[in-house]
Amino acid sequence: MITYRLFDLDFEGDDKQFDLYSRTGAGMMGLKDMMENAYGGRIRHRRLESGRGDGVISLEDLADRLPDHPEKREIAELVSDDVIPRLLSSRPHGKRESVILGYITSIAAERSKQPVTVHPMDFAGLELSRGTLILSSNGKSRPSHVGERMSSGIIKMCDAGDYLGQGMTGGGIVASSCGTYAFRNMSGGWGVILGDAGSFIGVNNSGGKILVKGNAGERVGWLMRSGRITVLGDVGDYAGILAKGGLIRIRGGAGENAGWRAGGVRIEIGRR
Amino acid sequence: MKSSEELLSKIKSLIDALEELRLHIGVKDISIGSKRFNAQLVFCLANACLRNRAVLLYGGMGANKTTLVNILGGVFMNMSFDDVENLMVTGHPEQTEEKIIGFIDPRQWMQPTSSEIRVLWTPWARSRWKLINEINRFPAGKQNLFLEIIKKRKITYAGQVLEPGDTCYFATMNPEFSSTYPVDEALMDRISACIPAVQPDLLAGLNLAERTEEIRDLAEQLPKFSADEFDALPHAVEGIPLDFLTELCIVSLIRDFTLCERAPCFDKTQLSGRNPSHGLCSGCHYYNNPEVCCWQIDEGLSDRVRQDLRAFTKAVSFVCGISNGSRIEVLRAVAPYIIWHRVTPNRSMLERPPYYGAKRLEYISDLVQKSIDRTVNERGEMNMIFSRAVDGELTVERAIKELSEHDDPIARLDYIPMLERLR
């Protein structure tokens, strides 16, 4: 028998035990005795409760609970009605949180019988399927990706950034103006731009209707296959380039090479 | 050499004198069992009883941080308050290594024979009571100087080495102001305990108003420790035993904070970039379970924390005169102060009531209580299974089977892999 001092306690054991403890890597002696000594026979066992904690309390909290590329359904399951106002007032950090917040604007509009007003933010109205969303104006920001992949409902806003209504399949958007690539890959629904639009509106569209009351940039209706684009002002060069179907009506003047290598699309250019 | 009882009696008379002379009247903000103490004073005294550990006092201006450390310096180094005050170094961007630790003696170049370079060490460098005042007013590069000093416990300059002996390190720090700099994480890990220095409450304020004499005059009335008594303090602390349950709670606490199923080697200290606050735990079945600590803290704890927990549990037990029974209650009181400055809580949890994003110490304290409660009350069975398997009373296969029914991070990530290696 050898006496062993571990921590501040003395324990006794034989060489064989010492070898065993050395093999565990713990270098311990009389471990069971020490455990019994520590617990004094008061051994209880309770399984770890697997219950989840309280509901979501912040955007960061929600982002932590979601996978890297969350779906709207997953967000809707976690977000209760009472927490939505708090989440909508959050400031997102990075694209992922912006996307999550965008989904939340849609969820808010879908759950509300009244129009929902939010401050201008990227991805607002993402995959909106019903209800009305109004983006208030702060006179500075031009949020991008508003109304992306929406299928129904209405979005009203002032100046929009790029990718307005990208991939939308239904519903409608009214904006004062927009940046580039508005209504790209659109297959349904409608969009109205009350002022000027940037370049590349209606790229690769297969449906839907777009009205621009002001001027538009170059390559209106590029690669368009179906749908309708009306511009009441002037447009830039290459209107309807490579388009294969649909109708592009330009009431003002068009730049050079309108309809270049297009086939099947109808392009009407001329003053009212 | 003085006995532990005599040293303890002197410490108690010092605590009483500090209060009677209105030199330190702090809020009694930690409780050990039924007794309540002021954390700022208790940890400063505990650090004076230990060696080569650093205590950081953190708080706004005028919270008696620097003054208290200087008063205690005078007591334990048997010096006047003014002399101790002259020892400390204070942070500002123009501080240099030469001003802090020493410089080459220029007189030696005038001598005809060249010998080994002589360095004039500053009083701070030579002292065994080192106060780094306003540590976060040193720019990051100059903070590294202290990292080396606390790490090596000796000071090198121009090839010369100064070994001042076992030293008590203290530092003070304000919250982030316009002219402060972030404190490096590695330096924070070398700070053994971080204590919030709060402003006196109303009653304490009234008591302090009764103070009429100057602090330096009052400090002279405090009992002083001789060099022998000062040197005997670490031995007295070393004589305080820690029971095995407390040891077990300390190790389990470290593992609760460090283990992570998704980290390399299940060790959160190996993480960089990805961590619990940045999506690491999404989908993990422990995630969002309030009983589990792992996902609530971004970093793991180093073994240095275990050493600090042991040392300060003993030292605080000694200073508070808790000589009998289990040290679990002391550990409960001490551990949050040892851990909270070293880790980053999950921000979404910290922002919830009742923490509101500001009460970081309280949040860590709650996690510590959960871990200790779990070890004391609920881990008994799995600990016994593991220990019986290690003792050879239970086959490893049977132990692994039984442990697999315990959904506890320590059982799953520590015990089972360890037993599998034993097979």
Image: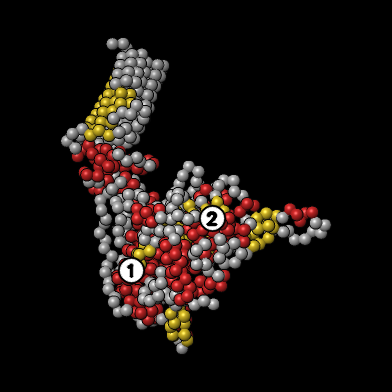
Kind of residue sitting beneath label 1? Gly
Above-or-below relation of B317 to A90: below
Q: Residue at x 28, y 39 (%)?
A: A88
- State whether residue A248 appears in this view: no
Q: Nearer the viewer, residue A221 or A166?
A: A166
Q: Give the residue type at disc 2.
A: Ile
Figure check: A217 above or below B395: above
Give A147 or B101, whichever is nearer the viewer.
Answer: B101
Q: Which coloring applies here?
A: secondary structure
**Above or below: residue B286 compared with residue A164:** below
The percent position of residue A259, horizontal first and vertical second, equals 37, 20
The chain under label 2 reads: B
Quarter containing the N terminus of chain B: bottom right
Query: Is mark 1 in CB contact (under 8 Å) with mark 2?
Result: no
Cα distance, mark 1 to mark 2? 33 Å
Q: Secondary structure at mark 2?
A: strand
Dividing the picture into quadrants, the one containing residue B153 is: bottom right
**Mark 1 crowd level (few <14, some 14–19, many ≥20, 10 Å Cα):** few
Q: Which image quadrant is residue A176 in?
A: top left
Q: Position of residue B268 (x, y in %)?
A: 43, 59
Classify residue B294 as left or right of residue B117.
left
Q: Is residue B6 left or right of residue A40?
A: right
Q: Residue at x 40, y 53 (%)?
A: B209
Q: Can residue A57 be seen in this snapshot?
A: yes
Compared to residue B226, the image places residue A52 above or below, namely above
Where is mark 1, residue-wise?
B33
Which residue is the site of mark 2?
A: B132
Q: Nearer the viewer, residue B403 or B105?
A: B105
- Residue that lies at the very extreme toward the front in this rendered image: B212
**What is the secondary structure assignment of the residue under circle 1?**
loop
- The furthest residue to the top: A271
* Disc number placed over residue B270 in the picture, else none: none
